[in-house]
Amino acid sequence: MGADSREGHAGRGTRQGRSRRVVVLAACGGLLVTGCATMPDSGDVQEVRGANQGDSQVRVYAVAPRDNADPNEIVDGFLEAMTSDDPGFATARKYLTKQAARSWKPEQSITVLTTAPDRDQADRNADPDNQGRAYPLSGRKIATVDARHAYQPISPAAYLQSIHVVQQPTGNGKGKEWRIDSLPPGLVLGEADFLRNYRSVNKYYFASGEDWVVADPVYIRQRQDPVTRMDPVTQTVRALLEGPTNWLKPAVDSSFPSGTELKKGVTTLTTDDQSTLKVPLNAKADLVGGQPCRRMAAQLLFTLRDLTSVRVEQVELQGSTGQSLCRLGKGQAAEFAAVRDTERDESPYFVDEHHKLMMLDVGGKEANAPTEVPGPLGKGATPLRSVAVDRGETRAAGVGENGRDLFVSSITTEQEAAPAILSSKAAKPTDRLSAPSWGGRGDLWIADRDPAAPQLWMVPDGSGEPVKVRTPWLEDDARIESLRVSADGVRIALVVTRGGDTTLQIGRVQRQNTGEEPVVSVLDLQPAAPRMESVTAVSWAGPSRLVVVGKEAGGVQQIRYLQTDGSTSATSVLPGLSGVASVAAPHKDSVPVVADSGDDGIVRLAPGTNWQPVVKTGTSPVYPG
């Protein structure tokens, strides 16, 4: 998207007398315009009323209220100023009374609407003493961002708030001016302005009691944060040190000692000529060394790898006096990854027309013929309906053709068919077992969709005694249609039907070893695709990204990337494909996505291409894990 093609005009409802803000294209050489400063005499500068969706290169600079501005201009000017990069939101505060300016805390929360809030005309009847005017604000609320930077989506709902303005003496005491004395908390932004100002990054914490990290997505400012004055790298490090988001916190640990913060006054972090990032910490970290320090450094390296603005090859943690606590390079940090990168690309598996497990090679320009998999699931001794292959590609789990039984066997050696390790008693095949999924600890997960006894099961290491997973939300008419467990084993994506709606939920996996049998629970379900009224299939596509097949209200089936927190990925919608029953995404972006497209069989989507047929007849495509 070339910066020279942006016009910068987007509607903000049907307001009268909407104030103007100055928008400067970031690609124009870093021009700065603030308040009523002199306009540059060259470059493409536009006065606009909004930001186009995806205008990440557009910079907005707030304009202070003019003398004798009427109440409409004050309200409109403030709404525009909230969308700017103004340091400390100083210009936005000029629209507020002194008391309101002191109490307003834009960093505490963000309310995200589908479009910028609509401002209606003032309701003068709401203030019969004529001491001020109340301006209703309305819109469709789709999410909030809390003080810990966590994005929390909701099904679109009506947003109704108000801004109240009063007259106060001017600075010279010779007249009066309109200012805002009451307003909604935090920032209120349309989705386009939110995505222009903020970006998603993954913080990383260790799965409780384990040696691998878990992604925890949050939103930070694209550029310098107006409140903290920190650049994006420093914001990201600070967010990591603050600890995990409230939703993930019960299932992860941070290696940073409680109270660890950046050294006071640090607002910029840059790498040296060897791509080493030195991170100065406060005294809480002074006594940390050895393996705990290496784990801290690993958290930082994983967290910073999503920032394209900086290349970090090594991290050095420093104590309060500048002493070096430890160093860690990217290669050393790899031991803490939930999925180890290998030179060999992943290959997907599927169930062929003879109900046998087969492996595909989809990495070349032309897909090769499927390869038969060793063992009873590949030889056809056990006809299959759906499959899952473990991360190490040594075992596979398969649900029998009638959906009743779950089998596990080797796919590297020939062996006799093993007895079922779990069976459903449901009368109809569609009410029996879901497709299985391997979790991060080598555990196997599956749902029994029996209406008489819906249940989520976990098989320890894929071979132990099945454990009933505690699911306090699985009651009434709810049932799990399908599931996919994350590579770290801490999160589970669930397609859940309740009351006729089929939605995508993300649950947190918690484990307790209080006796002979482990206690496993899936808790605090969060919507991951609230704008989709019907979800068909889901697959993990990285540490905090999903590929989702579903329909929005009144729309057609689509395939798109979504973040696990429910926010939209920057590369959201995949090319259209009809009749998709299941989808599988690899851990690496360089490997194709595969799908079961019904009449077209198994198809693949390589980066930068469109869908291509691979196998005419086949179902249940999966990547290992």
Image: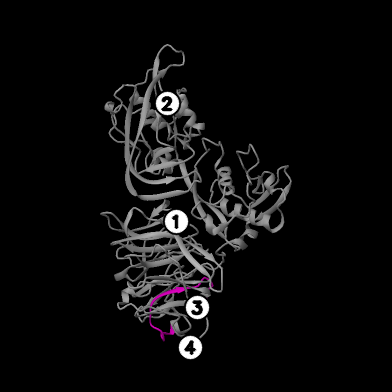
Query: Is residue 87 in the magenta section?
Result: no
Whole-angstrom CA distance, mark 1 to mark 4, is: 40 Å
The amino acid type, in three-letter code, at marker 4 is Glu
Label 1 element class: loop
How many neighbours does mark 1 have within 10 angstroms: few (below 14), some (14-19), or many (20 or more)? many
Looking at the image, residue 500 lies above or below residue 392? above
| Chain-order first, disc 3 or disc 1 | 3
| Chain-order first, disc 4 or disc 3 | 4
Question: What residue is shown with label 2?
Answer: 95
Label 3 element class: loop
The amino acid type, in three-letter code, at marker 2 is Tyr
Residue numbers of the magenta segment: 378-393
- Residue 79: percent from left, percent from top: 39, 32
Question: What residue is shown with label 3?
Answer: 465
| Chain-order first, disc 3 or disc 2 | 2
Give residue 277's mark. none
Label 2 element class: loop
Query: Is residue 386 in the magenta section?
Result: yes
The amino acid type, in three-letter code, at marker 1 is Thr
Q: Residue at x 35, y 38 (%)?
A: 116
- Residue 461: percent from left, percent from top: 53, 74
Question: What residue is shown with label 1?
Answer: 564
Q: Which is more foreground, mark 3 or mark 2?
A: 3
Question: What residue is shown with label 4?
Answer: 416
Q: Is residue 100 visible?
A: yes
Quadrant location of residue 455? bottom left
Q: Which is more foreground, mark 2 or mark 4?
A: 2
Q: Which is more foreground, mark 3 or mark 1?
A: 3
